[in-house]
Amino acid sequence: MLYYSGGKLDEEITYVKGVGPAKADLLEKEKGIRTQWDMLMDIPFRYIDRREFKTVGQVYQEGELVQLKGKLLRKNVQGTGRRKRLTADFSDGTGTLKLIWFQGVQMMDKLLQPGMEVIVFGKLGFFNRQKNMAHPELEIIKKGESQREHKGLQPVYSSTEKLSKKAMDTRGIRKITENITEQLSERDLPETLPAYLLKKLNLISRYKAIKWIHFPPDHRELHEAKNRLAFEELFALQLKMLYKMKLRKKRFKGHDFPEVGSFFHRYFKEELPFELTNAQKRVVRQIRKDTQSGVQMNRLVQGDVGSGKTVVAVLAMLLAIDNGYQACMMAPTEILANQHYQKIEEQLSRIGLKTAFLTGNIKGKKRTEILEGLEKGEINVLIGTHAIIEDWVVFKNLGLAITDEQHRFGVKQRARLWKKSKERPPHVMVMTATPIPRTLAMTLYGDLDISVIDELPPGRKPIKTTKTSDRHRGKMNQFLKSEIAKGRQVYVVFPLIEESETLDLANLQEGYDQLLDQFPRPQYQIGIVHGRMKPEDKDREMQRFAEGKTNILVSTTVIEVGVNVPNASVMVIENAERFGLSQLHQLRGRVGRGAEQSHCILMTGYKLTEVAKKRMEIMCRTNDGFEIAEADLKIRGPGEIEGLRQSGDLNLQVASLATDAGILQSSRKVAKAILEKDPELSHPDNRLLKTMLKKHKTGDIIGQIG
Ligand code: ADP
Ligand code: MG
């Protein structure tokens, strides 16, 4: 988010030449633009090189983006109702091409007249060997204007149908923006970065950058403008996060866990059936170090599904207990929390510790008992859902709070954990199985220390992933039967998308019925789990599957998170094209936990979009969560990444987390170096940075307390 330090550009857009109250109103409604500065922050999403035209005769590649200049010959409206469409023949002397509109037919019909000179830009298509272009970006060349308008790179702005109707299509918006920038002087757009930084990093001034991001004379200037603004954006974010992190470390003392005591040792000796991987050992060491530093720990532990985060969590909790503190662990779903509880309680009770389980559904006497046990310190470990952070849950002395699968929790919840311990906040550890690309982690969790468990326990066989479609369902069922005959279990997952929950449930039920047909009782047992079931019923079904009583578990994505049934070795994902990459990867991670070869089968429809095809291809190619996360970021952009939606909008206007990783890294490095030298930014050279800290808003969304 780029900010404005105040001045002329705060004036309302109404007063700009060519706007007026009606247009201003619409701009605010449609795009949230109120001031002139807002208008300048409406950054073009593309630029057209107006100097480069192709000719109809010269272009031949389907899907190619081309810009053509020519005349409209005749137009024609065909069909009625939803089938209605407008076609217009376009010619530039070298050939003709059909322009087609399926939407806004009436409006375009009014606008377009045969004989008009136009520039069209769009994707080349073919129909019956005839070249066409559907919904081109179109510009009518007015006499006398063509010379001035078609110089340099031309910005393209996003518009809406309502805006277009009021002459604020990309061209109209461009005109308004031009009117603002023409009146602009250096004084109206003061510098926000210190001169020494500009010089050192070879960045252009803010004034120039904002002018050029809208009207770049050429590619070089555009690049410089983007570079400068993206740097500023990411740098401000990093500066703010690092500053707050320092402040927090100074302000919040941490509980001290000097001892590795008897509980830790006993668990290690008696309850741990395997050797820790090197990655697990490293993370435990990092936690040890954090909890003896005198500073409150805030650590993100990232580890792919199945990398063994739970043991690390238990060991960390034992450290807390060995030093006289309580610990808690919060999971996003009841199923997952319960699974953790069952396993951990069993182990910890054997070494003499008391573990309790709390969810919103646990009420009355049972709840009262737990609450008393917590306040008196008789309960050592509390495991549960969101209920744990409710105000009525009071600990005697909480030393460590862990959240599993962090991406399901919002930042506010993270902050609430902090208040669970008197005087000092507890150490906080968040565990996530969504491998977040480094760039994102740095931006989202830039105020956390990050550990990565980058090694799977030994003996795991990589999961074999294949893609198939309905046509081969018979063959797949045969395969499932052969796996079941070997004693393995199968998950079949259906997508559940909130907007059409009932429809999806019907889908799930239908799939379930079909499976019942194909896998008849009593030879086969099939269970079903979905979000609309009562928690008890859900748990019972899960339990039956975990105990091997059911061969196939049909479910919605409620099993996505954390569930661990090592004997389940086949994951069938129905309508796989409807899932995002990271979700597919999470689901696949439910298998491959035992010693057998595991399989993931992606069942898709016939017609896949390019993006969906790519996703399937990546899934079949790799098991590496980080590679998948990077690919996901590239395909979908950061806005769609799981977790980002909940973690607040980063509001980046120019920078892109997908492509500006380099700038992000350098911005963090620079911010770090500056804060090391001048922690309070009190040096006169850093005066502008102090303002930046105050003005920059985005940093506030990131895991802060108070
Ligand atoms: P996740 O990181 O997905 O939460 P879990 O903690 O559920 O993974 O661990 C997955 C499985 O791997 C569990 O069955 C666990 O007991 C096992 N496991 C964890 N660490 C090791 C290890 N070092 N060696 C062998 N098995 C391990
Ligand atoms: Mg887990």
Image (cartoon, helix red, strand yellow):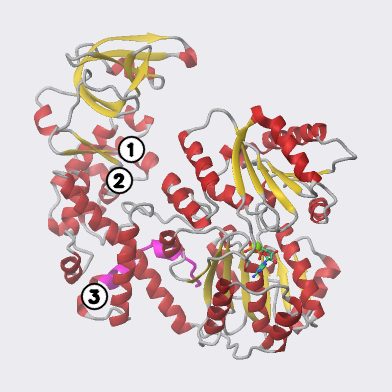
Does 209 appear above or below 109?
A: below
Q: Residue at x 85, y 41 (%)?
A: 524
Is 84 included in the stretch rendered in magenta? no
Q: Is mark 1 within 8 Å of ligand 1?
A: no
Image mark for residue 390: none
Residue 504, located in which quarter of the rendered image?
A: top right
The image quadrant that residue 107 belongs to is: top left
Lower sequence index among marks 2 and 3: 2
Residue named by callout 3: 686
What secondary structure is marked by label 3? helix
The picture places residue 410, in percent across and down from the top left corner, at 56, 60
Residue type at mark 3: give it: Asn
Q: Nearer the viewer, residue 340 or 3?
A: 340
Circle 1/circle 3 CB separation < 8 Å = no
Q: Which residue is mark 2?
A: 42
Q: Which span is picked out in magenta?
A: 689-706
CB atoms of marks 2 and 1 within 8 Å: yes
Distance from Cα at disc 1 to Cα at disc 3: 37 Å
Task: Work out whether residue 176 can be spotted.
Answer: yes
Q: Which residue is mark 1?
A: 158
Amino acid type at circle 2 is: Asp
Q: Residues within 10 Å of mark 3 (few under 14, many from 20)?
A: some
Rendered location of residue 652, percent (x, y):
36, 54
Q: Is mark 2 within 8 Å of ligand 2?
A: no
Quadrant holding the N terminus: bottom left
35 lies above or below 74: below
Q: Residue at x 84, y 66 (%)?
A: 364
Image point (55%, 80%), residue name? 285
The mark that comes first in sequence, 2 or 1, is 2
At mark 1, the secondary structure is: loop
